[in-house]
Amino acid sequence: MSVSKSKVTNSILKSEKKSLYRFLALYITMITFLMLVLGSYYFSTQKQIMLAKQRATLSKYAYEQTKKLKALHHYFPEERTYPRDDRFKSAIYDMDFIKIFSLLEQKDIKFDKDIYLKNGYIHFVKILDNYYLGAKYLIIETEDSGVWLEVIYKKMAIYSLISFILFVSLGIFLAKLFIKPMRDSIMLLDRFIKDTTHELNTPLSTILANIEMMDKEVMAPKNIKKLDRINSAAKSVSVLYKDLTYITLEHNRSNEDEDINLQELIKQRVEYFDALAHSKQITFKLELSYSTIHIDKNKITRVIDNLISNAIKYNKRGGYIKLTTKEHFFSIEDSGIGIAKEKLPYMFDRYMRFDNSEGGFGIGLSIVKNITKEYNIKIETTSTLGKGTRIVLTW
Amino acid sequence: MVKKFVIVCLLIVSLSGNDIFDNRCVPCHKDLPTSLQQMFMQYLKLYSSQKNVKYVLKYYLKHPSKELSAMSDLFIDVYGIKNPTKLSDKELKQAIDIYWDRYKVIDKLK
């Protein structure tokens, strides 16, 4: 199914981004590890090839040196000068690995190896059949030019870079492929919300207007209670409608910022939600001091409405909601179900809902986050599971 | 009088520099065509290290046999196998140590 992108879903969700980064981090770590293993295998193979090429030459040197040692053995002690050669350096050791004589630059010898490279020197270890001068081990040493190493490093760097780019491209392609169904679902939901929002306005306005117009004085108490319930439900839907309208239509319009008396605005919104709170026997505790904020009135109303609406929705029956305003400060505290500490970072993500027992689309706090971010308002959330949540806004 | 004689004898021995190797080994070898140095090199060629050479020499001197000897068959056929040593273990060790130090290759090459 193809779904057209809306402006809202063009940007990847935070959780989506996190999943993508995690996948890529894991993928790149694995690829790097694999490349390191392959690289070290390639390096060790190339080193063995180089040593194999050197072996024939060094073996010839060892044969020549053995013949000279044989002669020295025969003429010792009259002749005591150890045979030297410009092409290589050598040493002789007895069967207990005790040095008899050595001209080597690299003193550390691995007697258990036939040929090896260490600190830029190649050692060829020859075990003699006859221990001339007591020598069982003849070590031939030549300096390694390092040319082969440069060639290998160059090749490895090029291959690694090409492989890395290829694998990372493949990783991004795969990640996008995996995320596509999720993105499609979100876009479909967005489209649906946008299309249906327009259809909600007229019936909702009619319901709310008619409730206001009803004369409660002539109604039976039983019917007044029923009307209050209808009023609460209609207001809940109204909040949702306003959120949807804000997301789909209004958030792109230009701001009309003004100085808002927060104290007064909160009083109005509390009055608006009073019927809804009353239905759950929730009481409002207000500690309101004079506070102002320079902001678009519609936007700050969305912030306050969503915070109060959430505090009612996730509160327990008979609980409370405490609202406090001070200069550059607003806090809302509820006695609700609370949020687990590990889930706190995601609570402002769009479509994120922690409790499925309550209705809603999970877009309210996402709107709060977007508006506060736009106006550089700092949000701090503290929550304890089973005790409640406190959200503090400072600016 | 006896005391003076003993002191003089000891003085002569110490001044002459003769040790157990010179006194008990060299005299028997001086009539052989192969020098002690050549014999040493023969043992070195077969047994390599100081520890190994000394061990084999000690065993051979106590239990001489054709199989253990480093010398050629021709040499053994002509001059035979020596008799087992009468030196004590301590004396034998001293003699072999002197033999090694005198003819060794290590520290003599340049």
Image: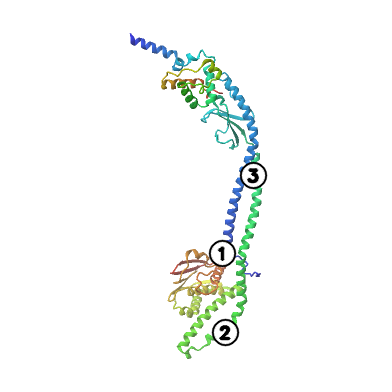
Camera-side mark, 3 or 2: 3
Camera-side mark, 1 or 2: 1
Q: Residue A139: name its quadrant.
A: top right
Query: Crowding near pointer 2: few (<14 within 10 Å), some, many (20+)?
Result: few
Q: Is residue B89 above or below residue A5?
A: above
SS label for mark 2: helix
For residue A153, the mark is 3
Q: Earlier in the sequence, mark 1 or mark 2?
A: 1
Q: Residue A128: name its quadrant.
A: top right
SS label for mark 1: helix
Q: Earlier in the sequence, mark 3 or mark 2?
A: 3
Q: Nearer the viewer, residue A66 or A378?
A: A66
Residue extending furthest toward the top: B1
Q: Is residue A344 above or below residue B42?
A: below
Query: Crowding near pointer 3: few (<14 within 10 Å), some, many (20+)?
Result: few
Cβ atoms at labels 1 and 3 below 8 Å apart: no
For the residue marked with disc 2, what is the amino acid?
Answer: Thr
Q: Which residue is found at the position 49% from the left and 83% from the top?
A: A228
Cα distance between the residues tagged 1 and 2: 39 Å
- Mark 3 — on which chain does it sit? A
